Each structure stands twice: as structure tokens, then as C-alpha cells.
Image: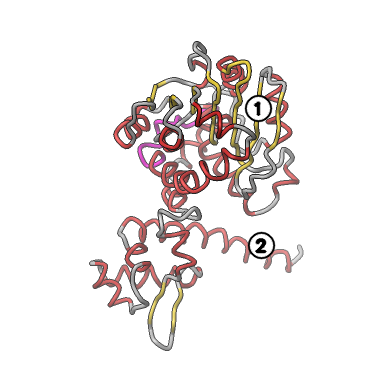
Amino acid sequence: MDRERVASFLDRFVGYAAGATTMALLAVADRTGLLEWMADHQPGTAEEIADGAGLEIRYVREILSGLAAAGAVEWDPNAGTFNLPPEHALFLADEGSPYYMGGWIDMVPTLMAQVDGVAKATREGGGVAFTEFGEAIVRGIDRGNTPSQKAFLIDRWLPAIPGLVDRLAAGIRVGDVGCGTGTVAALMATAFPSSQVTGFDISAHSLEIARERWRGPNLEFVEAAAESIPVDPPFDFVTTFDVIHDLSDPLAGLARIREALSEDGQYLMMEPNAGTRLEENLHDRGALLYGVSTLHCMTQSLAVGGEGLGAAWGREMAEDYAHRAGFSVFTPLEDITNKFSAFYLLAR
């Protein structure tokens, strides 16, 4: 027995546990408004912060102590004050920031709550259906994706496709498949009023939020799976954002999208930025991706008898699926740099 390896793994395991409990503390701080209050105020003692935020002092002191130990907030022992630095607030409290990670603060506790169901499926087969995750997963996905979509879709992602912005401005038919709460579809409809935009999703709850939040004469939301979106009249531009790997039948979904495209149509597919081979993903982002895949992406597909492709399929497998679905063009959009997402342009 190598005692150094024992000690090393003990430290690593403590890190795992600390990360999990830190996410839980962040979730409490987020849901009580503590993080938002701290982002808007100067450093203060636990008592001052609790009083200002209207919270119970004993909880506030313990939460802030844990977050200080994790490095999420700063502790000044001389002044006895806690501080949420603006650089950290970008991730934890500023929903307008493209770096905002509030969605993960929602999603991680929700995913952890599915451990028993995933363990049962691991023993017996099947999975945990999307509906079992409840409204919290919809809120988490919405909060996780919306900030970057608002910051980058119109100004960076769409212009990375040559000629697309001019076509959108002139007016084309656009479909956003797996639209969720509708942000991408609404942003395109607003920026390009001459284009007709339709968002498709299978989640009635997500579509209800989308219809309440977004309205426009050139925007509609339709309940439909990727495999059953309409093909006539065809779409000139289709998008999916973190959708294909979740599908029960990703190949059928891709084939249907191809069928729904006009002859000169284009399809923008965003998927997790991962390698197809495990050895390419042996880092923290890879660990996060496999964890989310097991606790959500893969299991909700397997729950309906699907393929369970999983989130870490990577560029090589994505290209293989695209060609098997009939696409003749598969182009990675290298000009879009993103640690978490990869962008591909497909055409018939």
C-alpha cells in the first residue's frame, strides 16, 4: 500500500465533498438573495449583512464562513468583514453577465436529487425521465444558458457563419429546435424582424414560459420533438443548442432537421466541447460533463428507451452522426472560442 497515494487521494476526496457542499451553500445564498445583496453593498460583518439582507444571523455567519473557506467570498480577519468581489459577482450574482453561473447553482442540487433514481436504473435498466426533474431543471437550464445567449448570439455566433446575417436581415424561415424557454428564438426574431422564427420543444412547461416571456408577430412556439418538426415549407436556417445529445434518437433528429432544410439551408449545431475519447476529457470540465451526462442527459434519454448518447460525444462522433444522417457539410466553427461549447455548421 502506497501511503503517499492514500494521503493524496484523501485530500482529493475532501475536495470532492467540499465542492458539493459549497454548491449547496451557494444555492441557499442564491435563493435567499444573500449573494445579490452582497454584490450591491460594501463589505460588512455577518451581523451587518444579515440585517441588511433581512436574514437570520446564525445562518448567514455559517454560510459566509463556508463560502470564505471555499474562496467564493473574501474574509478580512482584521476588520471582521465578508466581501463578494465584483469579479466573483460576475459568476454568482450578475444575471446580465455572460459569465453568470446561477444556472449551475440551480442544476447541481437538482441533479444530486436524482441519485437514487439513477442508481436504480444502473441496477435495473431504464432511466430517470425528464419530467421527474421537475420545474427546477427548467429554471436551471434557463438561468444557465440565457446570459451567454444574450451576450453572444447576435453579435458573435451568428456572424461567424458567412452571409447568414444578411440573409436573416432580408427575411428567411428559421427554426430553433429544443428551444426551451425561447431565448434564442426570441433574440433572432427581435434582431431580424423580416425573418419568421419558430421555436420547437417537447416540454410544455418550457413552452409556457416562452410564450409568456416572448411575443412578436414573427415569432411562434410549437410543441414538437426534433424527430417530428414540420418539413414543408422548409427552413432556411435551423439551430440547436445543447439538444442533440439529449435526444432519444439523435440520428433520427438530425435526419429530420436535414429533411426540414431548404436546398441551400444551413444548420447551426452547438454541443458540449469535449473529446470523443476519454483520455481527451481527463480534467475538471470533463468530470463535470460526465457527471451531468450521467445524472441528466443520458438517463433522461434511456428513460424513454432512447440511445442515451450522453453529453461527452465530441467532435468526431458528432461528425459521424451528421454524415450518417445525410449531411454533406460538417464544418467546425473555429472562430467561436468557448471552453464549454463547440459550434458546427451543417448543410445538406
Q: Could you tell me the amino acid type at mark 2?
A: Phe
Q: Could you tell me the amino acid type at mark 1?
A: Leu
Q: Quadrant of residue 203?
A: top left
Position of residue 232 in the picture relative to residue 27 (left or right) = right
Which secondary structure lies at badge 2?
helix
Mark 1 nearby-residue class (10 Å; few <14, some 14–19, many ≥20)? many
Q: Quadrant of the C terminus?
A: top right
Residue beneath the point at 57% across and 17% down = 256
- Residue 270, placed above or below residue 233: below
The residue that disc 1 covers is 346
Q: Is 126 included in the stretch rendered in magenta?
A: yes
Residue 280 pos. (x, y %): 74, 46
Please tell me how many numbered marks the rendered image carries. 2
Residue 35 pos. (x, y %): 37, 63
Position of residue 344 in the picture relative to residue 68 (left or right) = right
Disc 2 versus disc 1: nearer the observer:
1
Q: Is 314 included in the stretch rendered in magenta?
A: no
Decide whether the magenta segment is chiefly helix, strand or loop. Answer: helix
Labels 2 and 1: the sequence-earlier one? 2
Residue 170 pos. (x, y %): 50, 27
The residue that disc 2 covers is 9
- Residue 224, placed above or below residue 83: above
Residue beneath the point at 50% across and 11% down = 232
Coloring basis for residues: secondary structure
Mark 2 nearby-residue class (10 Å; few <14, some 14–19, many ≥20)? few
**Between residues 176 and 128, which one lies in front from this camera angle?**
176
Which secondary structure lies at badge 1?
strand
* Magenta stretch, residue numbers: 123-137
- Residue 95, placed above or below residue 234: below
